[in-house]
Amino acid sequence: MHVAIIGATGMLGQPVTHELIDAGFSVRLIARNVVATQQRFPGVTVVAGDLRNIDSLANALRGIDIVYLNLSIKQCEKEADFHTEAEGLVNLIEATKQAGIRRIVYLSSIIMRYQGMNGFRWWVFEVKQKAVRLIKDSGIPYSIFYPSCFMDSINGTQRINRFVLLVGQSQVQPWYIAAHDYGKQVVRALQIVKPDQNQEYDIQGPEAITQHEAAERFVNAYRKEKLTIVTTPPVLMKVGRLFSAQADYGWHITEALNNYPEAFSSERTWADLSKPETTMEQFATR
């Protein structure tokens, strides 16, 4: 199968891309910055494509069977801006129809299910929910994954230099998963899926732990340098959201992460795609 990937250079896109390549898929990367993407993935075909331009996407997708989407809303984006998971996805779906794509694979989120709980409403989650509806209504077979928290975020988006940043204290217990384990599950899903079958899978790691437990276990096992956990009160970010789109994003995502009552829901995922095995300690020492 020929797979095109949009968003291959991201924190979550890279592990999936490597797993698909290692599994023997013919992989093509679609990017606006071809040179930078080629440097990140030497030997892999990279073509130009822009989610703002349907023609560029249709040309980039010629000869492809499956397109994998690793899209996101940046913390600096505002509701009225162009979003890859909104207008960009509409363009992508039109391009897939022109190019004869046989399957759309999309990385969604389990946390967006917090929308509507405790009076919580956020335009970002509305975009993500609409994205799922757009894909389902496209008439193209789909595979949609709803992941819990990624271990990779502790050493990525939550880290600044030697500090791992947390906001507030929470007793909810996400099922942290390593992105490379998720990548293996994506590979398995594409290996077993039937041509016209639709797939939806919750993606959760081997155990449920609080965010502070996750950060502490990562920091204690990490050997490259000494890291320190810094916990800030949510009120600081709540005040900051009045002046910064990034702070507004941070407050909302933290509110959802700290309160979404995640329960285990991956029985079928583990049965079909295998159980993830990477612990936080193993991830920290990779």
Image (cartoon, rainbow, N blue to C red):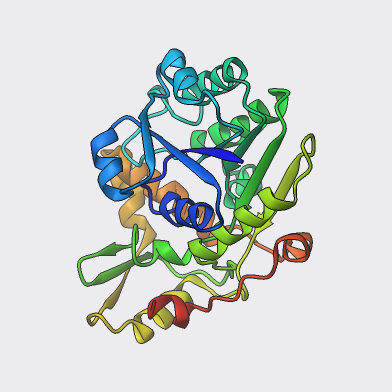
In the rendered structure, the answer to whether residue 227 lies left or right of residue 55 reads left
Say which of 131 and 81 sits in front.
131
Q: Residue, x 46% and y 19% (percent of image)?
A: 59
Against 245, residue 32 (above or below) is: above
Specify the quadrant of the image occupied by residue 181: bottom right
Say which of 61 and 255 sits in front.
61
How many numbered marks appear?
0
Provide residue 46's location: percent of width, then percent of height: 36, 36
Can I make out residue 70 in this image?
Answer: no
In the rendered structure, the answer to whether residue 95 lies left or right of residue 227 reads right
Say which of 26 and 72 sits in front.
26
State the quadrant of the C terminus.
bottom left
Q: Residue, x 50% and y 31% (percent of image)?
A: 85
Q: Residue, x 25% and y 70% (percent of image)?
A: 163
In the rendered structure, the answer to whether residue 274 lies left or right of residue 31 reads right
Against 25, residue 134 (above or below) is: above
Q: Residue, x 49% and y 61% (percent of image)?
A: 179
Provide residue 205's location: percent of width, then percent of height: 60, 69
Specify the quadrant of the image occupied by residue 167: bottom left
State the quadrant of the N terminus.
top right
Specify the quadrant of the image occupied by residue 7: top left
In the rendered structure, the answer to whether residue 113 lies left or right of residue 269 reads left
Q: Residue furthest left?
A: 161
Provide residue 43's location: percent of width, then percent of height: 34, 47
Can I make out residue 280 in this image?
Answer: yes
